[in-house]
Amino acid sequence: MLRLAAASLAGTAVEFYDFFVYGTAAALVLGPLFFPTFSPAAGTLAAFGTFGVGFVARPLGSVLFGHIGDRRGRRPVLIASLLLTGTATVAVGCLPTYEAIGTAAPVLLLVLRFLQGLGLGGEWGGAVLLTVEHAPAGRRVLWSSFPQIGPSLGFLLANGVMLGLSATLSDAQFASWGWRIPFWAAGVLATAGLWLRSALAESPLFLDIDDHARVPLVEVVRRHWRLVLLTAGALAIGYAVFYTTTTWSLAYATERLGVSRTVMLACVMATVVVQGILTPLFALVGDRCGRRPLCLTGCACAALWMFPMVALLATGEPLLMFLGFLGAGLALIMMFAVIAAYLPELFEPRVRCTGAAVGYNLGGVLGGALTPIVATTLAERGGRVPWGVGAYLTAMALLSLGCFALLPETRPVHVPVSEPARG
C-alpha cells in the first residue's frame, strides 16, 4: 500500500504541477505575451479564459479515460493521462508568442490548454481508484488521501520554480524566456512519474468484475445522473476557493494592490504547505467519523470565512493575507481529504471510474473554470475590498453545502466499497 500510495501521489503531483504552472503563468505573464492588443485587465481576463478551457476539457477527459478505466482497467489510465498532460505542458513552453506568429499563438495556446485538461480529467479517477480499491476498508480514506496530497505538491513545485525565477530574474528576463522554464521542467517530471507508475499492479476489484459496462457513460447517465449532479455541485466550492486563492489573488494583488509576485507566491505556498500536512490527519478523522460530516463542516466553514478572507486580502499585508488564505485552505482540506474515498464509494465498481471522475471534474467546471474570470470582473467593479468576490464564494459554499446534505454517508460499516451507495 505504501508503494502504491507513493506512486499515485507522485503521479498526481506531476500532473497537477503541469496544470498549476499554467494557472500561475496566466496570472502573471500570459496576458501581455499572447494578448498584447488587449488592455491589462482584458488581457488577464483572456489569459484566464484559456485557463478555464482546461476545466471544460476535464469532464471530456473523465469520459474518455473513465471508459478506458471501466473497460480496460485503472492502470492504463494512469500511464496515458500522464503522458498526454506532460507532452502538452512542454509544448506550451515551446510556443511562440503573439509577437512572433500573431493570432496563431493564442489559438495554439488554447489547444494545448485543452489537451492539458483532457489528460488531467483522467488522472484523478485512475490514481484514486487504484489506491481505494487496494486499501483495507477501515483505512480507505487515509490511503486515498495520498493522491490528494499530490495537488499540493504539484502546486508547490510549480510555484516554487516561479518564485525562484521571479526572485532571480528581472521582469524583462522573466517575460522574455524565464516563464518557459517551468513548462520545460514538466518533461523531466513526467518521465519520472511514468517510471514510477510502470510497476503498479491492476486493481484487484476491477479484476474481479465479471460484467463490465459496455458504455459506462450511458449507464452512469441512466442510473446515476442524480449522484453525478450532486457530487459536481458539492465539490464546486472546493475548486472555487482553491483557484481564488492560488490564481485570481495573484493577479489581483500584483495588479491592484501593488504587492510583489514574490510576496504573493510565498503567502500562497505557505498555505498550501499547511494543507498538505493536514490532509492525512483529516483523512484519519474521515475513517473514524465518516466522510459526510467533514464535508458538511468544511462547506459551513467556507461560507462563514469568505468575507473575512477577501477583507484580509485587500489589506495587502503579507501576514494578514496568509491568515485569510489559511482559513479558506482549512475549510477546503476538510472536504478534499475524504473526497478520494467518498466519491468512488458512491458508485458501483463497474462504472466507478467514469461516475466518480465525471462528478469530480464537473465540479471543477462549476467551481474552477469561471471563478478567476468572475472574480476579476467583480473586483474591477468594486472598491478596494472586493466584497462581490466574497458574496460569490459564499453563495458557492451554500450550494455545495446543500448538495452534500443530499448525499448519503458511505463509511464501510454502512456501505461496503463493493456495493453502490443507497439513497
Image (tube, helix red, strand yellow):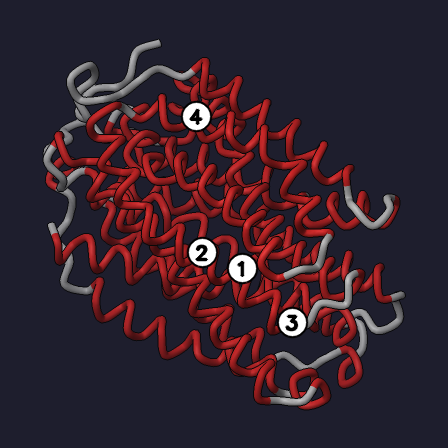
Gap in angstroms between the C-alphas marked 4 and 1:
23 Å
Gap in angstroms between the C-alphas marked 2 and 3:
17 Å
- Disc 2: which residue: 272
- Disc 3: which residue: 261
Label 4: few (<14), some (14–19) or many (≥20) C-alpha neighbours in 10 Å: some
Q: Secondary structure at mark 1?
A: helix
Q: Residue at x 69, y 83 (%)?
A: 175
Q: Amino acid at mark 3?
A: Arg
Q: Tell me if I can see residue 94 in this picture.
A: no
- Disc 4: which residue: 297
Q: Tell me if I can see residue 237 in this picture.
A: yes
Q: Residue at x 77, y 67 (%)?
A: 258
Q: Secondary structure at mark 3?
A: helix
Gap in angstroms between the C-alphas marked 4 and 2:
20 Å
Label 2: few (<14), some (14–19) or many (≥20) C-alpha neighbours in 10 Å: many
Q: Amino acid at mark 2?
A: Val
Mark with earlier residue (1, 3): 3
Q: Secondary structure at mark 2?
A: helix
> Where is residue 222, by image quadrant?
top left
Q: Residue at x 53, y 25 (%)?
A: 400
Q: Amino acid at mark 1?
A: Val
User: What percent of the width, then of the height, locates residue 405?
Assistant: 45, 15
Up-down relation of residue 27 to residue 306 (above or below): below
Contact between marks 2 and 1 (CB within 8 A): the answer is yes
